[in-house]
Image (cartoon, rainbow, N blue to C red):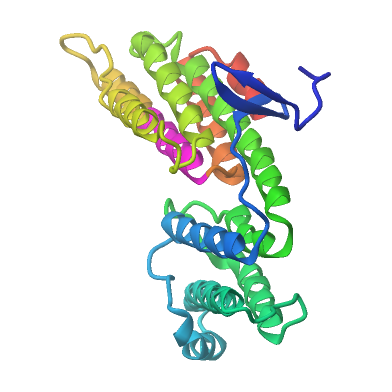
Amino acid sequence: MAAIPNGTLRIENDIKRVFYDGYWIKAYDPPADSLRAKKTLIQALTRRLFNHVEHGINIPGKRLGEARRAYEEEQIPANKRVKGAMLAGALFNRATDIFTKLVELQELGIEIDDNNALMRECGQCLQDALALGKMVLHRSGEEGIDELWGEPFRAFSIPVEAFYESRYIKIAQTLRDIDLLSVAMVTTFSEDPLFINVTPLINRFTDNAKNKCETLRTDKDIYDVWARFVVASEQLGAFAPQLPSQPDVSVVRHASDGIRLIKQGRALINDLSRARVTMPKSTRVYLDRCADYAHRYCTCTSATTSAAA
């Protein structure tokens, strides 16, 4: 696999795939590099961004002035973080508003070049939003996702085809982390007497999560892909450990801790597969939790320890 250059294409079962960093990822033809294509892309990326971050920050662009004043006047650090996130949302929406109008003008035959004052303002709004993005948390509350905040600005700044290439790299990184989490979960529970039967459910869930990660919502296969992903997630979430008929307190605690760890891993993989970017802090924390569980309950730790390293 190491000898295969990134960007190599092949057809597999009538599906075009592109190779990046060890993974053959489902490939899609990029749209033509035009202002209209960029407008559509930026709008989609902005919607996706708000879908994955904390609630309440999707502020309309027309309220940018008051959002900026609220942020600048705030003195309490915790409140300032939230208001900074709200300002970032307003900046993204203002940039989308500007770009939409520029495309409408272009379609009326008005020449729009990169040095246009509104183009510069649009780029500045996206850049300012990117800088504030570090204040924004993922909906899980555990960390931000800087990569999501950078995508609309990147789509504005580079050709559409180059943007698609950068997305494949990020999907490959996400697939790698899903595999890392899957190995950690299987290793943690495969020798645990209470959870012996959970391994096939973990494997089925992570396989479907990876398939979901590489499939765009506009793909005709999304109905089957999404359905299989949701069902596999539900089946893993419904798993019950094999308890003796009269378990003592230590066994009940063991089972409870294991179920909690499985649900945390399931939630994290769900988040990764939907966002299609890595969550390094959450991944590290989860691998540490697996290692701690394995140590406390004497399950096999070798793969978990190596994954954490």
Q: Is residue 210 left or right of residue 118?
A: left
Camera-side residue of 69 and 259: 69
Q: Is residue 160 above or below residue 22?
A: below
**How many numbered markers are drawn?**
0
Left or right? Give the position of 94 relative to 203.
Answer: right
Residue 139, x across and y down, in percent? 42, 54
Q: Quadrant of residue 96?
A: bottom right
Q: What stretch of residues is rendered in magenta?
A: 260-275
Instruction: Please check the rendered image and state whether residue 250 is part of the magenta-colored stretch, yes or no.
Output: no
In the rendered structure, the answer to whether residue 114 lies left or right of residue 266 reads right
Q: Nearer the viewer, residue 158 or 111?
A: 111
Q: Position of residue 16 (x, y in %)?
A: 60, 27
Using the image, determine if residue 52 lies above or below residue 227.
below
Quarter where residue 177 is shown:
top right
Q: Residue furthest left?
A: 245
Which quadrant, please, contains the C terminus? top right
Residue 271 magenta-highlighted:
yes
Residue 7 on image: x %, y %: 75, 32
The residue at the point 67 percent across, 65 percent down is: 156
Q: Position of residue 35 (x, y in %)?
A: 63, 66
What residue is rendered at 55% in x and 56% in y? 144
Picture quarter with the N terminus: top right
Residue 198 versus residue 206: which sits nearer the camera? 206
| Main secondary structure found in the magenta portion | helix
The residue lying at 57 percent from left, 54 percent from top is 145
